[in-house]
Image (cartoon, rainbow, N blue to C red):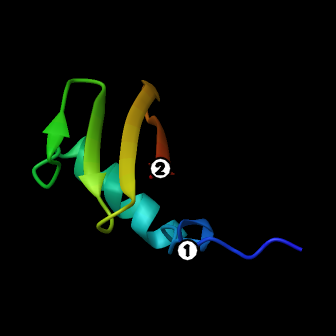
Amino acid sequence: MRQRIAYQAEPDYPTLAQAKAYASDFRNGSPNAYAKDDTWAKYWLSGYLDILTTRLQANIYVVVSYP
């Protein structure tokens, strides 16, 4: 059996409350985002995990975490 590699450790994904907070921040103009546009904003969750918040249509948002 192969040994686990350190980067394969599961990161601390955002909770539902955090996802709601990112969507709320995005609706309010993304003041805490490090990069933003009219339809998306990027946030840092940790040193190795980012958050992308996107508006799909009126009042429908997607919050995605990625390395």
| Residue 43 screen position, x and y as percent | 26, 52
| Disc number for residue 66 | 2
* Left or right, residue 31 beside residue 41: left
Label 2, label 1: how many angstroms apart (C-alpha)?
17 Å
Please tell me how crowded label 2 is: few (under 14), some (14-19), or many (20+) other residues with Cα within 10 Å.
few
Question: Can residue 29 be seen at all in this image of the molecule?
Answer: no
Q: Nearer the viewer, residue 35 or 23?
A: 35
Vertical comparison of 8 with 66: above or below: below
Residue bearing the label numbered 1: 6
Please, which residue is most extreme toward the right here? 1
Disc 1 marks a residue whose amino acid type is Ala
Vertical comparison of 32 with 17: above or below: above
Q: Please tell me whether mark 2 or mark 1 is closer to you in this view.
A: 1
Please, which residue is most extreme toward the front here? 2
Disc 2 marks a residue whose amino acid type is Tyr
Q: Nearer the viewer, residue 2 or 8?
A: 2
**Image-quadrant location for residue 26:** top left
Task: Give the mark nearer the N terminus: 2 vs 1.
Answer: 1
Vertical comparison of 58 with 32: above or below: above
User: Which residue is depicted at the point 55% across and 74% down?
Assistant: 6
Q: Nearer the viewer, residue 15 or 57?
A: 15
The quarter of the picture where the N terminus appears is bottom right
| Residue 10 screen position, x and y as percent | 60, 72
Question: Can residue 5 be seen at all in this image of the molecule?
Answer: yes
Q: How many marks?
A: 2
User: Which residue is depicted at the point 44% across and 52% down?
Assistant: 67
Do the numbered discs 2 and 1 sit on residues whose CB atoms are within 8 Å?
no
